[in-house]
Amino acid sequence: MTTPAVSFEFFPPQNLEGSFRLWDTVQTLAPLAPRFVSVTYGAGGTTRDLTREAVATLHKFSGLNVAAHLTCVNASRAETLAIAEDFAAAGVSEIVALRGDPPKGSAGFTPHPEGFASSVELVRALAGTGKFKIRVGAYPDVHPEAASARANIDWLKAKLDAGASEALTQFFFEAETFLRFRDACAAAGIDPALLTPGILPIENWAGVAGFSRRCGARVPAWLEDAFAKALRDGRADLLATALCTELCSDLIDEGVGRLHFYTLNRPELTRDVCHALGITPRVQLQNVA
């Protein structure tokens, strides 16, 4: 089995305890030599400043290639591009460009009166600066707001045509979900090599199941049954490790060379899966000084 290249997603800390957890997560996963690590935005842009601070700190002290999430929500074009310029000034040259989730309680996404109306517009503007490598999101299970499966793929193609060079997918639970999506993308003229599957190790089944339904990721009945039994028997962690490892292994066997892990700042399960895939420590995190 070929050893894949990996990347990891973190979210920014919102308090001192969260800061320690983030740094512990980085220390745990940095030795696996990720291609990059990314730091998320909260829904509605609520962690904009925290994201900016976390990205700058990780870039300065971790020695890792850090990508910053950037969204269109609750900001004008000028404000959004000013944040991007701040990232560039801090030495961060990679951005994950997303439309972003609307604020909690909102009926849906409403563009800022002076803001970007879509992720395509954001990607095009970032690409126009010539300063960034741009990644975007993709949805193997159709995005809840997409009119159809074809529209879902057409929108991804528009983002890539606008200047993005890689697409990180939403998580999924069966390899066939990604493989069917990859085939459909290829048929629509998208280079399959630009697709990187997003992997979510299941730390908390109830939380993952609820979030999956909200974001449109299909939850197979067999998976619900498996976790119901595992939770009853106290084997949920063992099951989560085994299933995630099997999912990644199946993808690798089908020619996938990159995996992007959503760590939720809880690194142990991600680390264990990577070790099972043959991804062993290669570098040490540089000391903070």
Image (tube, rainbow, N blue to C red):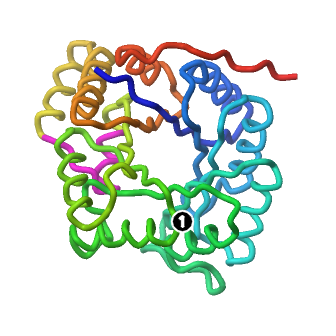
Number of numbered tags placed on the structure image: 1
Taking the image as shown, residue 203 lies to the left or right of residue 184, namely right
Query: Furthest-right residue in view?
Result: 289
Tell me the crowding category of disc 1: few under 14, some 14 to 19, or many 20 or more residues within 10 angstroms, Cα based: some
Tell me which residue sits at (62%, 47%) in the image: 67
**Nearest the eye: 205 or 273:** 273
Q: Is residue 135 above or below residue 31?
A: below
Tell me which residue sits at (35%, 30%) in the image: 202
Q: Is residue 133 above or below residue 222?
A: below
**Residue 44, image x, y percentages:** 57, 63
Residue 49: quarter of image: bottom right
Taking the image as shown, residue 17 lies to the left or right of residue 265, namely right
Q: Main secondary structure of the magenta part?
A: helix
Query: In which quadrant will I find the N terminus?
Result: top left
Q: Which residues are magenta?
A: 208-220
Q: Is residue 89 above or below residue 179?
A: below
54 in the magenta segment: no
**Nearest the eye: 46 or 289:** 289
Q: Amino acid at mark 1?
A: Pro
Tell me which residue sits at (61%, 59%) in the image: 70
Q: Which residue is mark 1?
A: 103
Tell me which residue sits at (31%, 32%) in the image: 205
**Residue 68, image x, y percentages:** 64, 50
User: Mark 1: which secondary structure?
Assistant: loop
**Residue 78, image x, y percentages:** 74, 77
